[in-house]
Image (cartoon, rainbow, N blue to C red):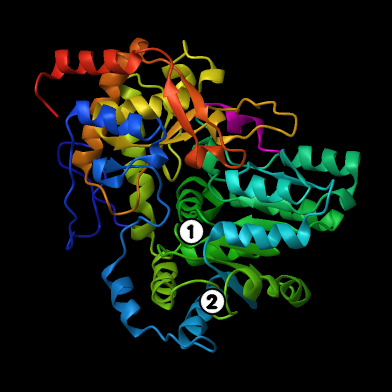
Amino acid sequence: MSKVTFFKGEQFPLEMHKVRIIQKLNLLPIEERLQAMNDAGCNTFLLQNRDVFLDMLTDSGVNAMSDQQLAAMMIADDAYAGSATYTRLYDKLVELFGMDFFLPTHQGRAAENIVSKVLVRPHTVVPMNYHFTTSKAHVTVNGGEVLELITPEGLEVSSTNQFKGNFDVDALEALVADRGADAIAFVRMEAGTNLIGGQPFSLANLREVKATCDRHGLLLVLDASLLADNLYFIKQREADCADMTIPEITRAIADCADIIYFSARKLGFGRGGGICIRDEEMYKRMRGFVPMYEGFLTYGGMSVREMEAITVGLDETMDEDMISQGPLFIKYMVEDLDRRGVPVITPAGGLGAHLDAMRFLPHVPQSQYPAGALAAALFIASGVRGMERGTLSEQRDADGVEPMANMELVRLALPRRVFTLSQVSYAVDRIDWLFANRELIGGLEFVEEPEILRFFYGRLAPIGDWQERLVAKFREDFQDSL
């Protein structure tokens, strides 16, 4: 990775790329932002993108492609079956992961669907270092139960622990002793725990999990969607891996897994996904679901143009200059917020900066969705769209009881190679102002609550007139500024 030291000692990330295509942005006046948020039912997913200034909702499918990716899309072979595009993607995955079998899917949750349909039986459990919303939903809809076995440090909001995404291996051993190996459908390890701040696991921890799985005959399934960030953190933070190349770390991770699935919207920077499988028998068990749900075996619901871009994107993921850009920007944003006293998850992880809504809004109870309220307030104050990652992102159990999330976070994703430092600084400034006026922010309540994945399209309303009071304070402080 390129190392650049600045003469006066400043510390900020230097982009190792140049911008050649731009897209115009629009920053609405705050009164129009308030109207847009109310029209969206206080759900940032339901905002119209034309009303958004900086879209930090997700890094899924919105990372900037390289010139080489765009060029590769022009050579796509659009044959329905036997496409050379598929062969190029397959060969790249075999090169990186060393698994002989691959099933393409249209995105990561389609891969989760197939994995869960084949492996999850009623009353089985799936231990994870931490769940993702759709991974949990696919397990539960097939009659299974998700158990969070993350290391206890993983749920500490402020920490110096560099690998808060590690699996609690002792807890896994205890689970096997308590329920027996037959009750465990598979063990899932997520690279870059999405819901608790994009925190990585170490290679040493993954190897310990693999050894435990081998002792008890358990399948280890890796969700590699956020692998790029995790690779960077292993290289930078794990002393035993400092002299390894990124491809060597990638293969060492892959060697621990029986199955790897991924969303290419994150890994590879294209719209698609897939499942890499080590065992031929397991491949055959899963194979039939691809033509049933996705498409033929050589495209799986993906555009061949996207497949060509993903192939190049996977190759670029082996470039440390490329995969460092996201974590370095996130670190810059997290440390700037932390210096200002704004409560954020530390240390900085991957995917984005994460505001800790329970410390930001201690006066808003979890039953009133503080992370959702903070995301709504942030859009009103800045035009920045973030994502609630807390109780709203959970769903009620079969008895209608609403579980409270371990954390109430607002995720501010930083799609790779998309934003400039001045835009990040603008977001930090508005968050700083919002924190200074945090007592104005109140809670939310549902007016329309879907039964499944409610955070995607549920609609809420503010409790009281706090949004109008926030707008009035903004105008008092910023006058006619946007």
Left or right: where 220 falls relative to 298: right
The total number of labels drawn is 2
Across and down, in percent, residue 101 comes to 65, 76
Q: Which mark is residue 95?
A: 2
Q: Which mark is residue 243?
A: 1
Dots 2 and 1: beta carbons under 8 Å?
no
Left or right: where 199 falls relative to 332: right
Across and down, in percent, residue 112 comes to 63, 57
Nearest to viewer (mark 2 / mark 1): 2
Is 155 magenta? The answer is yes
Q: Residue at x 42, y 18 (%)?
A: 360
The image quarter containing residue 29 is top left
Q: Quadrant of the C terminus?
A: top left
Q: Residue at x 56, y 26 (%)?
A: 156
Q: Residues within 10 Å of mark 2 (few under 14, many from 20)?
A: some
Whether residue 199 is visible here, answered yes or no, is: no
- Residue type indicated by callout 1: Asp
Identify the element where label 2 is drawn.
helix
Whether residue 363 is visible here, answered yes or no, is: yes
Look at the picture and state if 364 lies above or below 12: above
Q: Residue at x 42, y 86 (%)?
A: 77
Give the spatial CA distance, label 2 vs label 1: 21 Å
Look at the picture and state if 215 lies above or below 100: above
Of the numbered discs 2 and 1, the one sitting upstream in the chain is 2
Across and down, in percent, residue 437 comes to 30, 13
Left or right: where 476 falls relative to 405: left
Q: Residue at x 38, y 59 (%)?
A: 320
Highlighted range, magenta: 148-159
